[in-house]
Each structure stands twice: as structure tokens, then as C-alpha cells.
Amino acid sequence: MNTDGKAIKLAPSILTADFGRLAEAIRAADEGGADYIHLDVMDGMFVPNITFGPVLVKTVRAVTRLPLDVHLMVEAPERYLEVFAEAGADILTVHVEATKHLHRTLQQITALGCKAGIALNPSTAIEAAREVLPFVDQVLIMTVNPGFGAQQFIETMTGKVRRMRRLMDELCPLADLEVDGGIHPHNVLDVIYAGANVIVAGSAVFNEKGSVAANLDTLRERMLMDA
Ligand code: DX5
Ligand code: ZN
């Protein structure tokens, strides 16, 4: 539980996993107690990197029953909502910076039967989300600039998480607050104390240093230190 009594969820991002053995990596995360699988879709336009599309989401869907948390780092994501929903996404998160008619986009996600998420880049003010908060199931605060795994956590984002949770308590108290980028055992508790309850972790889970199960255990041990 975090400070508002919300269950804390761990959402491993597969970005730094070995894609040659992806099914194994997903199974290891599932058996290791992950709550979601976080899938980073990048289009080479919204962010300076290209990853994968609905075909891979469908492949992951066939390997696990965990909810698929699909983070669309894509310009005009409204063009692709339906294909990602069909591929098996459970949560579809769009960037507030990437779509002109955000409210409509969120309605489209909900109509597809998915949970609707919005993501904010580090430089985007929390106010940019205010008018749509009553329509979201999840808010994602980027704690690095999107585009790559294994970047350094931007320290000023902890205060942003705290301010966003306060605004959400007013406008969408049931919605989850997710953090993404540079989260490791040494800082996970800080973001939880600030109000985050969905924790994305890529390189802290899929790395050369330890097994997926051991890395998830280490993160969870640190998360459970709150009481
Ligand atoms: C960055 C992605 C993240 C990334 C997190 O654009 O949205 O999900 O994979 O990776 P780490 O935890 O290594 O920063
Ligand atoms: Zn992500």
C-alpha cells in the first residue's frame, strides 16, 4: 500500500530485455510476481527511437495473462488505438503532447474497452492534464525524457509526482499514478512516498546483474519498507 492506501503495482518494461528470448523474459517477470507488463511503443517521430508495434503486443499477449500496459510514445496515437486494443492491450497510455484532441482520444480508448492513461514528459506542467483528469484511469509521470531505457532519474520529478497526486486526489481520486524512467531500488521508495502507486522499471529488472526474479524481489523489498 502507498500513503493513500492504494495497492502498489510493479510494471516491468521489456525495453532492455533480450528480444531473442522475449517469451522467457516475460514468463520470468510473470512468475516473479510482476503486476503488469509495460510495453514501450516508439515511432521515431514523437521520440528519437523506434521500437515495436501491435505485432509484438500480440506476441506478448499470447505468453502472459498479466495486464498489458501499453505506453504509446507516438505522434497522433489516435490512429493506432484500435489495432493496439485488438492486439491485447489492457491499458493504453497516450502522451498529452502528442494528440490534439486529448479528451476525444481518451473517450476512444474507453470505448475500446481499455483503461485510459495519459503521460506527461518531464517538461510538461501538471496543469496540462487538469481538464482531462476526470476521464483517466491512470496518469504516467515520465521521470526521464522518453525514448530510451537506462537513463538517469530526473530528481525534480519527485516533487512533480507529489503535486500531481494532490491534483488527482481532487479530480480523479481512484486513478493510478505511474512513474516511468530511472527507477531502481535506491529511489523507488521516494516516488512511492510522493504518491506513485504503479512503478515501471526496465533496466532494474532486465539486466545482466541478476535474474528477473531476484531483481523483482530486490525492488519489492525496498517498496515494502513503507508501513
Ligand atoms: C522510456 C520508457 C521507459 C523505459 C524505462 O522512454 O518509457 O519505460 O523503458 O526504463 P528504465 O527503467 O531503464 O529507465
Ligand atoms: Zn514507458
Image: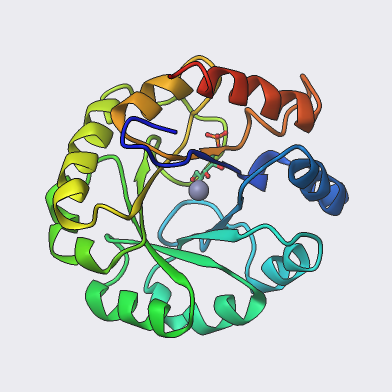
The quarter of the rendered structure image containing the N terminus is: top left
Q: Which is nearer the eye, 43 or 213? A: 213
The quarter of the rendered structure image containing the C terminus is: top left
Is 173 rendered above or below residue 77? above
Kindly tell me whether residue 80 is visible in this rendering.
no
Q: Which is nearer the eye, 193 or 59? A: 193
Q: Which residue: 41% across, 85% down? A: 111
Q: Which residue: 28% across, 61% down? A: 96
Identify the image quadrant of residue 195: top left
Q: Position of residue 208 (x, y in %)?
A: 78, 24
Is 120 rendered above or below residue 202? below
Kindly tell me whether residue 89 is visible in this rendering.
yes
Q: Which residue: 58% across, 69% down? A: 89
Q: Which is nearer the eye, 199 or 1? A: 1
Q: Position of residue 174 (x, y in %)?
A: 31, 55
Q: Which residue: 41% across, 73% down? A: 77
Decide if residue 24 is on the left or right side of residue 226: right
Q: Position of residue 218 (x, y in %)?
A: 66, 20
Identify the image quadrant of residue 150: top right
Q: Which is nearer the eye, 188 or 33? A: 33
